[in-house]
Image: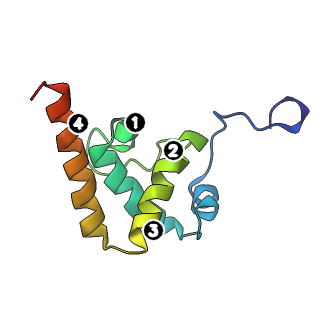
Amino acid sequence: MGIGGFTWQNEELTRPEVAAMLKPKVSARQLQAYLNIARKYLPEFQKFTNKKTGGLDGYAKLYECHITVLQEIRSLAREHTLADIESEFQQRALNKSEVGSGK
C-alpha cells in the first residue's frame, strides 16, 4: 500500500491475485497459459521467459501494468482456443517487426 491507502502502480502482485483480478476470474493454471502466450510475443513480457530452459519463468514478478494485456487474452479466450489466440499474437508480433524494419 502506498501513502494514504493508495496502491502504487509498481506494487508486486501474486499470480493468484492477478488471476482473481481478471474478469471473469481464472485459475492460476489458466493465468500461466496466458503468460506463456504473452511472453513469446510481447516485449514487455520477455522477462517471463526462463533464460536457461526457454520456458515460463515462475519467478518473474507481475505488476498492475501487466493486467491489461492479460485481460485482453482472457477476453479472447472466451471466444477462441488458446492456439487461435497464440496465432493472433504471433501475427501481431510479425506485423510490428515488419513496421519496425520499414517493410
Which numbered dot is residue 80? none
* Few, some or many residues within 10 Å of mark 1 (<14, 14–19, 20+): few
Sequence-first disc among 1 and 3: 3
Question: Closer to us: mark 2 or mark 4?
Answer: 4
Question: Closer to us: mark 2 or mark 3?
Answer: 2
The residue at the far left in this view is 103
Amino acid residing under circle 1: Glu
Q: Which residue is mark 1?
A: 44
Q: Position of residue 2 (x, y in %)?
A: 81, 32
Sequence-first disc among 1 and 4: 1
Sequence-first disc among 4 and 3: 3
Amino acid residing under circle 4: Lys
Which numbered dot is residue 96? 4
SS assignment at label 3? helix
Sequence-first disc among 2 and 4: 2
Q: Quick check: 76 left or right of 11?
A: left
Sequence-first disc among 2 and 1: 1
| Cβ atoms under marks 2 and 1 closer than 8 Å | yes
Q: Nearer the viewer, residue 25 or 78?
A: 78
| Quadrant of the image occupied by residue 97 | top left
Q: Which residue is mark 2?
A: 66
SS assignment at label 1? helix
Q: Quadrant of the N terminus?
A: top right
Amino acid residing under circle 2: His
Q: Quick check: 86 left or right of 67?
A: left
Which numbered dot is residue 30? 3
Question: Closer to us: mark 4 or mark 3?
Answer: 4
Amino acid residing under circle 3: Gln
Q: State the CA–CA distance, disc 2 to disc 3.
A: 15 Å
How many marks the image carries: the answer is 4
Q: Nearer the viewer, residue 67 or 57?
A: 67
